[in-house]
Image (spheres, helix red, strand yellow):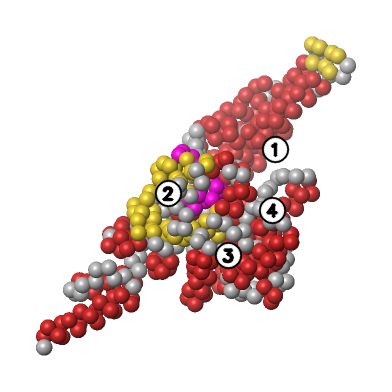
Amino acid sequence: MALISLKNVQYIYMEKTPLEREAIKDISLDIGKGESIGIIGKTGSGKSTLIQLISGLLYPTQGEIFIKDRDIKKWNSKELCKIIGIVFQYPEYQFFAETVFEEVAFGPRNVGIPDEELENCVREALTTVGLSYEEIKDRSPFNLSGGEKRRLAIASILAMNPEVLILDEPTANLDPKGKVEIMNYINKWVQSRNKTLILVSHDLDEIIRTVKRVIVLKEGKIIFDGPIEKLFLNYEKIEEAELELPEILKLRKVLEDKGYPLEGAFTVHEIVERIVAFKEHISIWKS
Amino acid sequence: MEVLKTFPLGQYIPGNSLLHGISAKAKIIVSFWLIIIIFLLKLNFYSYLLFFFLILLGILLSSLPINYFVRSLKPVYFLVLFTFIIHFFFGEEGGRVYFRYGIIHITDNGIKMALFMSLRLIYLVLITSLLTLTTSVLELAQAIEDLLKPLNFVKFPVHEFSMMMTIAIRFVPTLLEETDKIIKAQKARGAEFGKGNLISQAKSLLPIIIPLFINAFRRANELAEAMEARCYRGAKGRTRYRVSRWTIKDLVFLTIGILYPILLLVFF
C-alpha cells in the first residue's frame, strides 16, 4: 500500500473568476514509505501547489488524494499533521513566540503531546538540527542568525515527528556552508528514522546529493518520474523543463562527447576514477 | 482561506473604452459633483429617471459587462433593503394612508421616500464603481495629488500624503497573500482557528498576527531603504514619468458631467 497516492488530481486557482488558473493538470502519483523524492521544475510549474495538496492545505478541484488509503478530506487536520510535516519556503517568517522553546513547542502542543514530554521533544528536535538546547531555549527566535533561524524553523516541524517530511527550498538564501549543513542534518534525521522525504528545490546539485527518485514538473504536468540515474540519461527532460543542468552533468556531457566511456558514473569521484582507468588503459595499449 | 481570495480588491478592470481613456482628474471631479447632486436632487420621478440616464451613459461608455456593476452593489444590498423597509413602514406621514397599525404606517409619502432613498444609495455605489472600475489605483492617487495641490499653500504635505496612500493600497494584496501563507504554515503545525470561546479564538490568532506585523515592518524598512537608494527625497524637484494633460475629450466629459445635473436641478 502506498503511503500517499494521488489519482488524476487537478487544481484550479480562483475557479470561476477572470483570474482562473490551472496549476495542476491531471497528476497521478504514488509515494511509498521511506522513499526520498525530489520535485523539480521552474517557477510556476506547480511544485508548491502539489506539496500543499499532499499536505491537505488545499483540496483538489478534481480527482482524489489518499493518505494511508483514506481520502485526505476525511482526515482530521491534527491527525494529518502527525503524518505529514511541511516546511515552507522562508519558514523563519512565521515565527511568533517569545522564546525558542515556545516556538518549537507550538506544533507538538497542538497535536496533543502531553506537557511532561514536551521538553524532551523540543530538546531532541533542536539537537537534531545542531542547536544546543540549553544555550538557545530562552532566547528570542527573532535575534538568531539567518542560518540558526532556518534550522529552528525546521526543528519546529521535526518536533512533531511526522512520517513524511516535505521541504520547500529549505536552503534558499543561505550561504554554501549553511546549505550543506542543513541538508546533512535533515538527511541524518530522515535516514535514522526511516522517514519519507519530499524535497522541492531549484538546485539540481542538492537534489542529486539527497534523493533517489525525481519528479519533473512542467506547466502542472509530470514530464518525468523515475530514479535519478535515469533522469541523467535523459538530459533533454531537464532542458524541456527549462532548468539549468547541474555542473557535474555539464562536465559529464563534455567528457562523453570527447569519447570517455562514462556509463553509470554520475559523481565527481566515479567520473575521475573512470578517466584515470581509461588513461591507464590507453597508455598500456600504446606501450 | 477563500475569504482572502474573494476580497473585493483591485476593482479596476483594464480596458480601452472611452471612459478608461478620460483623465482620472476629470473622473474624480465629475464623480464628486454627481454625489453632491444626488443629495440636492428634487424627489420626483423624472429627475431620478433622467439622472439614471447619465449613469447608464457612463456604464455604456465604460463598455464593461453589466454584471460587474451588479456585483459592486452586493455589499450594500442589505443597507438598501433596510433603508427601504424603514421608510416604507415607519416613514414620513402625509398623503394617502394605506395601512396603519400601532407605529407601523404605510403612506404615500413614506413609499415615495423609501423608493428615492434606496435609489440614492444605489446611485452612489454605481457612481463610485464607475470611477474605480475604470481607473487604476496609481492614476487615482496621482489625480488626487494633483487635485489637492492647492493645499500646499496651507503647508499640507500633499505629495507625502498621496505617496503614503499609494504605498498602502499597493501593499494590500501583498499582505493578503502573506496572511494566506502564514495561515497555511501555522495550520501545518496543527493550529486551529475559530474554535473554542472568544478568548481562545483571539489567542489562536496571535500566531498569524505577530508574524504579519513583523514582516510588515521588515518590508517597510526594506522599501524605505530601496527608495533612499534611488535618492527619493519627497516632493521637492520631483517630476513625473507620465504627465497627464487635459484633452478635448476630458473637457467635453467634464462639461457634460457638470452641466447636465445642473439642468436637472433647474428644470425639475
Which badge, 3 or 2, is on the more N-terminal residue? Answer: 2
- Seen from the viewer's position, the closer of residues A9 and B80 is A9
Q: Nearer the viewer, mark 4 or mark 1?
A: 4
Which residue appears at 34% of the width and 52% of the height?
A223
Dot label at residue A154: 3
Three-letter amino acid code of the residue under disc 3:
Ile
Q: Which residue is mark 2?
A: A30
- Seen from the viewer's position, the closer of residues A242 and A168 is A168
Q: CA distance from mark 3 to mark 2?
A: 25 Å
Splitting the image into 4 quarters, where does residue A88 fall? Answer: bottom right
Three-letter amino acid code of the residue under disc 1:
Ile
Q: Is residue B168 magenta?
A: no
Q: Chain of mark 1?
A: B
For the record, the magenta segment spans: A50-63
Dot label at residue A112: 4
Splitting the image into 4 quarters, where does residue B237 fall? Answer: bottom right
Three-letter amino acid code of the residue under disc 2:
Asp
Determine the residue located farthest toward the bottom in the rendered image: A287
